[in-house]
Image (spheres, grey):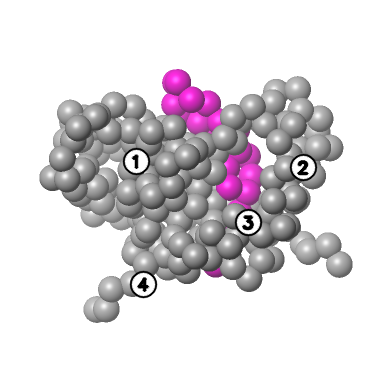
């Protein structure tokens, strides 16, 4: 089998202000999902998180998109439509975190209704490449232990400005929300992962997200 081509994963976590006006939030959802029409994106989805599992960092919404190359991601970042949508929504945002990585395990766009578990790891300082590789190997091994995972994308963050020091990222795509609950029930798998990687990890952010149906274009 030939290896899948690498793609660029781009995940942005948002904490929307609790008193944000509902009409402004609806406009934000519409505006960010509208960026899927840019021919730079292979996939783009934005919506409310199902769960935010970090005790130190809490988020409410997530944008996930995929690109053919780092250059396409750079062009997306400075595209006038993207800049306009970002600037319009800054007043209702309390916090933002963004992580980008190269993945060769996620060439297909996840379907609406699919569930995603997104995990960011902040590694302890002064770890060598062997320790980093071991953490990535531990994360990659979960697909063999939980067969419902349709895609497992993982890699090392290459955009550090808004990543809050987190350097390892992964997305597990599952058929639906019930599969996330089934994954949670496999506590021995989760605990085994924590034990294998725990010595190298300083902190973790985990969020769950269900991909909403595509919004209709405004004609």
Give the x, y percent position of residue 85. 73, 49
Q: Earlier in the sequence, mark 1 or mark 3?
A: 3
Give the x, y percent position of residue 160. 42, 42
Residue 99 falls in image quadrant: top left
Q: Are marks 1 and 4 in contact (CB under 8 Å)?
A: no
Q: Which residue is mark 3?
A: 78
Residue 3 falls in image quadrant: bottom left
Residue 210 part of the magenta-drawn span? no
Residue 62 part of the magenta-drawn span? yes
Q: Which residue is mark 4?
A: 5
Find the distance from the CA under tag 4 to the CA under tag 2.
35 Å
Find the distance from the CA under tag 1 to the CA under tag 3.
23 Å
Q: Which residue is mark 1?
A: 167
Magenta residues span 42-63
Q: Residue furthest bottom?
A: 1
Q: Earlier in the sequence, mark 2 or mark 1?
A: 2
* Left or right of 149, for residue 189: left
Q: Which residue is mark 2?
A: 88
Q: Which quarter of the figure is the C terminus placed in?
A: bottom right
**Residue lying at 58% horizontally and 62% vertically, measured from the top left:** 75
Q: Residue furthest left?
A: 130
Q: Earlier in the sequence, mark 1 or mark 4?
A: 4
């Amino acid at each position: 089998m030939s290896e899948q081509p690498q793609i660029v994963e781009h995940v942005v976590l948002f904490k929307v202000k609790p008193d944000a006006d509902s009409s402004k939030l609806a406009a934000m959802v519409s505006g960010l999902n509208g960026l899927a029409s840019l021919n730079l994106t292979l996939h783009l989805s934005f919506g409310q998180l199902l769960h935010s599992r970090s005790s130190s960092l809490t988020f409410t919404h997530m944008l996930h998109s995929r690109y053919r190359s780092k250059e396409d991601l750079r062009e997306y970042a400075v595209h006038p439509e993207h800049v306009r949508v970002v600037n319009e929504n800054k007043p209702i945002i309390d916090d933002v975190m963004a992580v980008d990585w190269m993945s060769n395990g996620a060439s297909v766009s996840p379907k609406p209704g699919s569930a995603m578990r997104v995990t960011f790891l902040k590694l302890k300082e002064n770890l060598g490449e062997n320790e980093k590789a071991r953490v990535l190997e531990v994360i990659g091994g979960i697909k063999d232990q939980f067969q419902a995972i349709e895609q497992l994308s993982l890699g090392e963050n290459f955009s550090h400005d808004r990543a809050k020091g987190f350097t390892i990222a992964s997305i597990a795509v599952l058929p639906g929300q019930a599969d996330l609950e089934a994954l949670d029930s496999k506590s021995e798998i989760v605990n085994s992962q924590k034990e294998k990687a725990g010595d190298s990890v300083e902190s973790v952010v985990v969020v769950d997200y269900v991909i909403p149906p595509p919004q209709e274009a405004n004609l």
